Amino acid sequence: MNKDIETLTDLLLAPGGGRLAASRTLNWLLEHHAARSVALWEMQSSGPRLALSVGLDQEAMSHVHDTWKQHRKGLDAGKPWQGDQDILVPVLADDRRYLLSLSGLKPSRASVESVASYARVAAKALQRDSGAPLARLEKDIERDELTALLQREEWKIARVARLLHVTRVTIYSRMRRYGIVRPARA
């Protein structure tokens, strides 16, 4: 497991409700990417509604709404948007749609890819208070990590098993459990 995921797992599994875990995740994103503000928005037909934020001021809030209006089609289709100092990442967590905004970034301090996985974790954590079980969140993190490791190691099961200090049978079992399908060889 990479260091960032370990850090987030520690934040999420610490005592407290889902809102607290989501807040910890947002604080971590803010510090890790040296941003001015970070917010998690619940998407509604009329636009984003603020669910949770750290460091968000009226100017940043207006900017997020304006950017959402300009790039709504792509964001609604699930495509992240990155500007000079801002990132907007749409997130689907179970049956709810969220938008994570990271504002006031220093140039090249964050990428959409690095923020997207944490956006999903924050949204899932926030849902813990609304009945989404923690086990599902842990399963999502483990599935994502295993998939990333398999892709990085070019789907060499024995190599992945050695890295995780488990047997190949365990890797195949986890792949079945999480619905991970090995791509067809070219």
Image: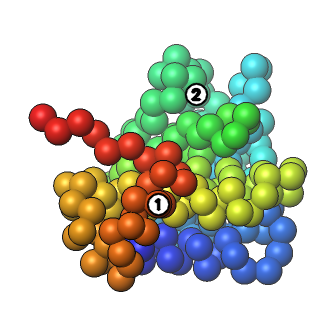
Crowding at dot 1, Cα within 10 Å, few <14 / some 14-19 / many 20+, comes out as few
- Residue 182 location in percent, x, y? 32, 45
Question: Residue 173 bears which disc, if any?
Answer: 1
CA gap between label 2 and label 1 equals: 41 Å
What x and y, as percent, mark residue 10? 61, 79
Amino acid carrying label 1: it is Ser
Left or right for 170, reference 141? left
In this picture, is 75 found above or below 108? above
In this picture, is 33 found above or below 50? below
Q: Nearer the viewer, mark 2 or mark 1?
A: 1
Q: Nearer the viewer, residue 144 or 170?
A: 170
| Amino acid type, label 2 | Trp
Please tell me how crowded label 2 is: few (under 14), some (14-19), or many (20+) other residues with Cα within 10 Å: some
Residue 154 position, x and y percent, is: 20, 55
Q: Is residue 57 left or right of residue 33?
A: right
Q: How is the image coloured?
A: rainbow
Q: What is the secondary structure assignment of the residue under circle 1?
A: helix
**Residue 1, quarter of picture:** bottom left
Residue depicted at 33% across the width and 68% down the height: 168
